[in-house]
């Protein structure tokens, strides 16, 4: 039935169910199938799969795998993640926990020997702990396979193909990734990574080609065997490297690892509801404190949001996100990370080990082997009476919550387009200072200083302020702070 026929059909007041359906249909028409992510190649992989008949789950898997090639200063196959998935046919939202687990099952407990170093991050030196003993049990490969198996429709090998091509051809190294590499060079070039990120002894710069030929072999193995990281050839190589260099991984860790589907945390917002995860993200609690921004001037907006967010500990980590909506209205936001990365790569496969056990901000309570580590990740969906209105996620460690919710509020409450909301100047309140990009309202910053807050005015937009990727009724956007991108299907 055409839209005009539908509108005629429901004009009679008795046809309430038809009217409700048409409201959903019109809203769905305005939610164009799209992918947003942290690199143009990541986005292109997702779009390719959507245009080949895949759904949001298929595209999220393919794009996330592509990010493990194109965005290896932010994420990698041996990391962990969280996702949220919306199934349009049933209206059901589910969270997928594929974050890393604490290693050491089947072994006597021993102290992890970590490598400690300070890395310049913006205006500050930040302490990191890396090395092979910082590597937790990877969860991302299991999560990608679980998402494809549960909700996808294309063959697994087809989903891996775009990432294999990227690994074979190499990928453009964008400005934000080059800036990140310059900060993280002590880790990224510590061992095998020197050949990848500093070929010929010179760090990659913006516009260079990122070459990781070992990933071709690794991804071909994964295409043949989705469980290769846990029970196949990649597992064998990873365990051997961990044992050789003093890591904590065991075969029992891999045998025990499982991705977990859970119900999301839902919280009301802007006439609808947000579905996300809680834990260290603190997103649900913060949403409940968000003021109504519509109608506020820019000074009032900044001051109200600073009060709502409060101050959070200021620790770093490297993360990326993919957001996808397909033509049927299914949606997925998938966030993944290696932490900083341990500095160790599986020889011949160019796979970087994660460093989650060295991320001080995630080490809460007693770490029991086999237990899931905590995370600040908060992939998020927004729904209202007309259905899905937004799919989003963010990178940025402790700045993730600020970045994500200022963008979500900008779109859902203030009526901004996705691009305007993502590109708007950001601020973040750390315990001892409010950090602000150029363009944040000066009157608000002056008022914060008058209240006794220290304000640091950054000279330019920066990686520090997180990276948001969003698909919404108001368009799609990737974050320029991370050289992100977005695209719609043809």
Image (cartoon, grey):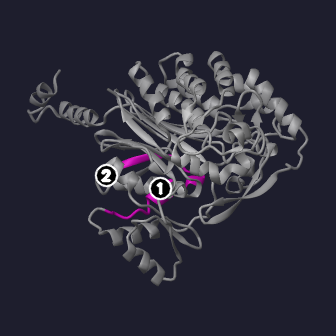
The residue indicated by pointer 1 is: 403
Secondary structure state at the residue bearing disc 1: helix
Magenta highlight range: 270-293
Please give the name of the residue rendered at 60% of the width and 40% of the height, measured from the top-left corner: 81
Calculate the distance from the C-alpha at mark 1 to the C-alpha at mark 2. Answer: 21 Å
Q: Residue at x 77, y 52 (%)?
A: 366
Q: Residue at x 56, y 18 (%)?
A: 156
- Residue 169 image label: none
Q: Quadrant of residue 324?
A: top left
Quarter of the picture holding the N terminus: top left
Q: Which of the 4 image quarters holds residue 282?
A: bottom right
362 part of magenta stretch:
no
Q: Is residue 310 left or right of residue 488?
A: right
Mark 2 element type: loop
Horizontally, is 256 left or right of 461 in the view?
right
Q: Is residue 463 above or below residue 471?
A: below
Q: Is residue 291 magenta?
A: yes
- Front label number (1 vs 2): 1
Q: How many marks?
A: 2
Image spot of residue 409 (x, y percent): 37, 55
User: Looking at the picture, does residue 55 appear above or below residue 42?
Assistant: above
Q: Residues within 10 Å of mark 2 (few under 14, many from 20)?
A: few
Residue 153 percent coordinates (x, y): 47, 18
Mark 2 or mark 1, which is nearer the start of the sequence?
A: 2
Q: Is residue 317 shown to the viewer in this render?
A: no
Which residue is labeled 2 in the image?
271
What percent of the width, then of the height, locates residue 19?
18, 34
């Amino acid at each position: 039935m055409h839209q005009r026929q539908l509108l005629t059909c429901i004009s009679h007041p008795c046809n309430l169910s038809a009217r409700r359906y048409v409201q959903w249909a019109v809203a769905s028409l305005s939610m164009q199938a799209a992918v947003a992510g942290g690199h143009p190649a990541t986005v292109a992989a997702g779009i390719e799969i959507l245009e080949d008949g895949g759904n949001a789950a298929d595209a999220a898997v393919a794009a996330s795998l592509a990010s493990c090639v194109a965005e290896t200063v932010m994420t990698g196959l041996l990391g962990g993640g969280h996702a949220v998935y919306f199934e349009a046919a049933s209206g059901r939202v589910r969270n997928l926990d594929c974050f890393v687990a604490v290693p050491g099952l089947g072994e006597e407990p021993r102290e992890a020997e970590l490598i400690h170093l300070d890395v310049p991050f913006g205006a500050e030196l930040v302490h990191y702990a890396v090395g092979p003993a910082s590597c937790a049990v990877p969860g991302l490969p299991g999560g990608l396979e679980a998402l494809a198996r549960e909700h996808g429709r294309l063959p697994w090998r087809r989903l891996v193909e775009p990432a294999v091509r990227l690994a074979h051809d190499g990928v453009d190294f964008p400005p934000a990734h080059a800036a990140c590499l310059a900060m993280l060079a002590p880790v990224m070039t510590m061992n095998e990574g020197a050949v990848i990120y500093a070929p010929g002894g010179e760090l990659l710069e913006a516009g260079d080609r990122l070459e990781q030929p070992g990933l071709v072999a690794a991804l071909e193995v994964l295409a043949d065997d989705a469980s290769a990281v846990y029970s196949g050839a990649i597992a064998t190589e990873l365990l051997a490297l961990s044992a050789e260099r003093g890591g904590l991984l065991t075969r029992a860790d891999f045998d025990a690892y499982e991705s977990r589907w859970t119900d999301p945390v839902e919280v009301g917002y802007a006439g609808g509801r947000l579905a996300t995860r809680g834990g260290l993200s603190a997103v649900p609690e913060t949403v409940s404190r968000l003021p109504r921004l519509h109608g506020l001037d820019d000074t009032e907006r900044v001051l109200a949001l600073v009060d709502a967010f409060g101050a959070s500990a200021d620790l770093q980590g490297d993360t990326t996100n993919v957001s996808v909506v397909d033509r049927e209205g299914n949606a997925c936001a998938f966030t993944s990370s290696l932490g900083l990365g341990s500095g160790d790569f599986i020889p011949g496969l160019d796979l970087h080990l994660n460093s989650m056990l060295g991320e001080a901000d995630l080490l809460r309570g007693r770490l029991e082997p086999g237990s899931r580590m905590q995370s600040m990740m908060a992939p998020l969906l927004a729904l209202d009476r007309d259905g899905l209105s937004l799919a989003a996620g963010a990178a940025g460690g402790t700045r993730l919550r600020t970045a994500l919710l200022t963008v979500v509020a900008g779109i859902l409450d203030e009526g901004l387009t996705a691009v305007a909301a993502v590109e708007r100047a950001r601020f973040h309140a750390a315990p001892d200072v409010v950090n602000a990009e150029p363009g944040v309202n000066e009157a608000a910053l002056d008022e914060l200083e008058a209240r006794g807050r220290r304000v640091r005015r950054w000279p330019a937009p920066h990686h520090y302020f997180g990276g948001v990727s969003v698909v919404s009724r108001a368009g799609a956007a990737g974050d320029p702070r991370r050289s992100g991108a977005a695209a719609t299907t043809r």
